[in-house]
Amino acid sequence: MNANQAKYALSRASVLFSHAIAPMFAVASMFSIQLGAALSLSTTIRYSTISITWLRLCFAAVALAAIARPPLHTYSRQHWGAAAALGSAAACMTLCFFEAVRRVPLVFAVAVSFLGPVAVATFGERRLRRLMWPVFAVAGVLLLARQDGMWVVSPIDLIFPIGSALGWVVHIVLKKRVGMVFDELEGLSASLIAAAVVTGPFGILLSGGHLPMGQLVNAAYIAVLVPIVPYVLKLIALRRMNASAFGVVMCTEPAIAAAIGCLVLAQPIGRSQFIGTLCVVGACIGAVVGGIRAHSPPRSRV
């Protein structure tokens, strides 16, 4: 083997290794999100969900703005309108999700929020085969809501998980609009700034204008876990794998939430929770794979 062949073989091995470990970055991002959600529970109980969410968005907005350095002074009214809409949706989604984590098991909160993207993926479908995935996901959520033959989630507790799911739906729709007027990183940075501004009055009001050092420290490390580290890890993963494969891997997040909830929050995983989690994960994968096939060009027959 000559020097050129050796160099090519080494380069090829490096590319294959990079692609092989890419899913690990996606999985690590989900672990970071769910760990942040679990560790935020005591903090949100002590200081309120709104004030912690506001501070977390502020820290994340500052950190991402320092990385992306968006030219804020050049943005038009259209830019800020799109950023404000996406930021408001993101604020609603994250606020509802973290409040849901206070009230229901972590895996249940995640599973209900995943109903949003499953509904978006199958919206407008006429084939009954693909319409079974939302039904499958709802069945999984119902199983997660029961334990030892009893309902462990009351109807009023569904408000915030459902709000998170609806916020995710709006976020998915608006993200396409933002992608048309911003570069990806600049759009995310501007939307985080908008989200921090939207939640600011409520966070300041509930904190009474007084922010203890403990609250600032807790909000800062939660902001690192959600969303700063996950975003970086997802970006690394997407540069090493295609979007379709990335979407399938991300469908396993309810299972990761179940594991984190069990290990960190001591939330039990019974037979019903195990089967329900599998149903939600399977429904998400089915919806993603079905969407990929629906939008792929038909194969020509020779």
Image (tube, rainbow, N blue to C red):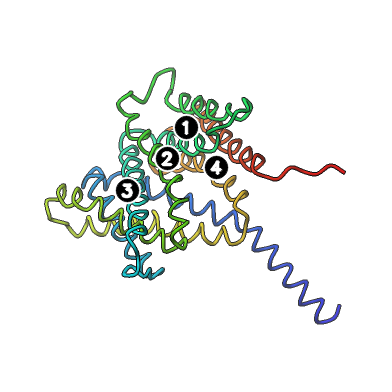
Residue at point 36%, 66% (across, down): 65
Report helix, strand or loop for mark 3. helix
Q: CA distance from mark 3 to mark 2?
A: 28 Å
Q: Which residue is mark 2?
A: 261
Report helix, strand or loop for mark 1. loop
The one nearer the camera, 45 or 63, is 63
Q: Which residue is mark 3?
A: 88
Q: Earlier in the sequence, mark 4 or mark 2?
A: 4
Indicate which label's residue lies in the foreground, 3 or 4: 3
Q: Earlier in the sequence, mark 3 or mark 2?
A: 3
Q: Which residue is mark 4?
A: 251
Label 2 crowding class (10 Å Cα cut-off): few <14, some 14-19, many 20+?
A: many
Asked if the residues shown at circle 1 and circle 2 are in contact, with their CB atoms under 8 angstroms apart, the answer is yes
Label 3 crowding class (10 Å Cα cut-off): few <14, some 14-19, many 20+?
A: many
Q: Could you say where residue 59 lies in the image, as x and y percent from the top left? A: 30, 61
- Taking 162 as reference, is 302 above or below it? below
The one nearer the camera, 126 or 20, is 126
Q: Could you say where residue 219 lies in the image, as x and y percent from the top left? A: 28, 55
- Taking 46 as reference, is 281 above or below it? above
Indicate which label's residue lies in the foreground, 4 or 2: 4
Label 1 crowding class (10 Å Cα cut-off): few <14, some 14-19, many 20+?
A: some
Indicate which label's residue lies in the foreground, 3 or 2: 3
Instruction: Give the residue type at disc 4.
Output: Cys
Asked if the residues shown at circle 4 and circle 2 are in contact, with their CB atoms under 8 angstroms apart, the answer is no
Q: CA distance from mark 1 to mark 4?
A: 19 Å
Q: Which residue is mark 1?
A: 269
